[in-house]
Image (cartoon, grey):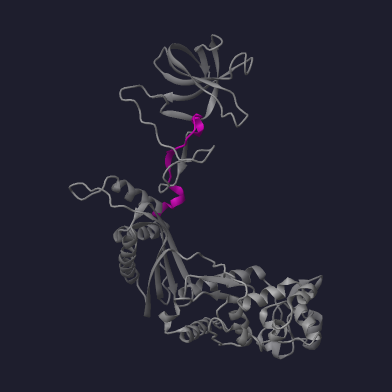
Amino acid sequence: MAKVRGALRLAACDPRAAALGLRPGMSLADARALHPALAVVDADPEGDAAALARLADWGRRFTPLVAPMPPDGFVLDVTGSAHLFGGEAAMRADAVARLAALGFRARAAIAGTPEAAAALARAADGAIVPSGEEARALAPLPVRALGVADEVVEGLARLGLSRIEDVALRPRAPFAARFGTDLVSRLDAALGRTRSAIGARLEAPPYVVERRFFEPILTPEDVSRTLARLAEELAGMLERRGEGALALELSLFRVDGAVRRLRVGASRPTREPARMALLFREKLAGERDELDIGWGFEVVRLAALSARRLDEAARRLDGSVAGEDLARLVDALGARLGTERVRRIAPCDSHWPEAAATLVPPSERGGRRREDDHAADWLAPVPGAAPDRPIRLFARPEPIEAVATVPDGPPLRFRWRRVLHETAAYEGPERIAPAWWDGAGLTRDYFRTEDSAGRRFWIFREGLWGRETAAPRWYVHGLFG
């Protein structure tokens, strides 16, 4: 039951309740007046939606393109996959039988449009209609099969229009004006007059390989062997297209309907079967998780969720590739700890020191420039020259008290963290102005400063004296060595 406009009403009825004359939308008081011993429970829309999503995931064993169709169904795009199950009729029968084994009483139909298939499932269970013949198959069905609101069905019944053909053969405008556009939109979509997509719950991956078993596999060793064979097939597909996988997903479909998914990522494109299998082993080891095989897996699917061009790399005399060991380490850490926890430092095209670098995933080519979103490259150091930037850069510049000559002189002495430092040598200034389009911030003059004890600091004065401010402030931004 659910509260609708302040009144408790029946949200759904099981077959026994329907046989007693109860129907969704009936007030709870009227229902109890007819059957005082009626057992009711509170409606749980969120739980129903979650259960429907799990069923949609279960349906991906038949095709990658599956979408929930609330409140009580889901749709599969079986184009090109029905032959794997012996044809459309055998595929439909298999799906219904499997759902029955899981405790669901399912109705299913196959048609050229999702809306037509849904209408046929509601009113003509088991129908299989070739594409283009939807109008003939839907004509004798009741209007309610389109899934329109009860008020629309009742309003059409008062006009003597109870079947879909009664509406389909008449002009659209009067129906839209009286009942709204939902009726017309559903009818046109079911008849194929308008093109509709199913809005798949998960996007179909570009590369997929799978194994289906007549008898389910029951041991981790069987899963490992299956994964190894699938990785070899996937590698062949990637090689033919000259690409390598960046993200992989292993889907394990259990006999009882549960689906286990494992996702891993690679720092650089790969099509090495051993490396793919290693990533999934590290993933399981990192989660300290044993595969809950239960009654066994009947379908094992390996997919490359994303791929990128992979050209053959130059190999050394021993057959290794430069940087391959580091890539393997990064991939293993990502699989064990989670790819979101493994980052590398990449340059950004910005002169502002604190914005000149960022943390990015290992697979990303480079940092991004905040102003125009272009990638940047590290500047090569000048051989034999002292570094322009400190080894240690503070997350935030720390204020100091400094004595300096004006307007552009270096700090003669400064106090940082309660310690007084006398300047023995300096280089600079290096002037960095804020981006003109930001309209905020002051110009900075940076000095590479060495004190009398040999400690080297990166210090800047914020604001041009007499032009931007009358009282420039000093900061230490980093340390050399």
Q: Position of residue 183 (x, y in %)?
A: 71, 75
| Residue 300 falls left or right of residue 125 | left
Please tell me which residue is depicted at 60% across the width and 14% down the height of the picture: 465
Front-most of residues 319 and 156: 156
Q: Within the magenta stretch, is there residue 213?
A: no
Please tell me which residue is depicted at 57% across the width and 77% down the height of the picture: 113
Front-most of residues 83 and 293: 83
Specify start and end residues of the magenta stretch as a single range: 335-355
Residue occupying the far top of the picture: 405
Residue occupying the far left of the picture: 317
Quadrant location, the N terminus:
bottom right
Q: Position of residue 463 (x, y in %)?
A: 59, 19
Q: Within the magenta stretch, is there residue 339?
A: yes
Q: Position of residue 208 (x, y in %)?
A: 40, 67
Quadrant location, the C terminus:
top left
Please tell me which residue is depicted at 64% across the width and 14% down the height of the picture: 470
Q: Position of residue 257 (x, y in %)?
A: 49, 75
Q: Is residue 72 above or below residue 369?
A: below
Please tell me which residue is depicted at 41% across the width and 49% down the height of the picture: 363
Q: Is residue 276 visible?
A: yes
